[in-house]
Amino acid sequence: MPQCPVCRVKFGDWGGVAEHLSYMARTSDGAHVMWLNRNISNSELRPEELEVRLRELFNHGGDLGMWIRRRVIDRFYGENPHPFILAMQRPNRAILLGYVIEHQHFLRN
């Protein structure tokens, strides 16, 4: 059963989730707007278009592992690559130091 990725309210279909997200964005709810901006689009979408995008985003086709890999690749290497990926194309001392510190932090935790 589809649910809002922000507040976890359950709906009967993705159209209901799209209507909910659209309404929450129009009321300027920060958490919903931020999620839409990060995961769907920075532009306002009609609920019908939002429904299509939600279906595309959450359709893992039965292979969750591949879905996760595609999401990571799209996020880091897609239209707007992550700044770290761009910086690592021509690393300098500061970039590599930052990488080492982050890597060490995550290994410890």
Image (tube, rainbow, N blue to C red):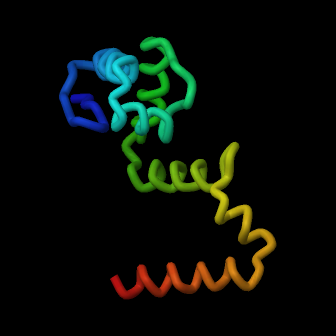
Task: List x then y, in percent, for residue 10.
Answer: 19, 28
Which residue is located at x 57 percent, y 85 percent? Answer: 100
Q: Nearer the viewer, residue 97 or 106?
A: 97
Image quadrant occupied by the N terminus: top left
Q: Nearer the viewer, residue 25 or 75?
A: 25
Query: Relative to 7, is 13 above or below?
Result: above
Q: Is residue 14 visible?
A: no
Which residue is located at x 34 percent, y 37 percent? Answer: 31
In the image, farthest residue toward the left: 10
Q: Quadrant of residue 54?
A: top left
Q: Quadrant of residue 25?
A: top left
Query: Relative to 109, is 65 above or below?
Result: above
Would residue 12 appear left or right of 82 to someone viewing this image?
left
Q: Nearer the viewer, residue 42 or 76?
A: 42
Q: Nearer the viewer, residue 4 or 52?
A: 4
Image quadrant occupied by the C terminus: bottom left
Would residue 48 appear left or right of 30 to someone viewing this image?
right
In the image, farthest residue toward the right: 90
Task: List x then y, in percent, for residue 65.
Answer: 42, 56
Task: List x then y, in percent, for residue 42.
Answer: 55, 30
Q: Is residue 43 visible?
A: yes
Task: List x then y, in percent, for residue 4.
Answer: 28, 31
Which residue is located at x 54 percent, y 30 percent? Answer: 41
Which residue is located at x 67 percent, y 82 percent? Answer: 96
Numbered disc total: 0
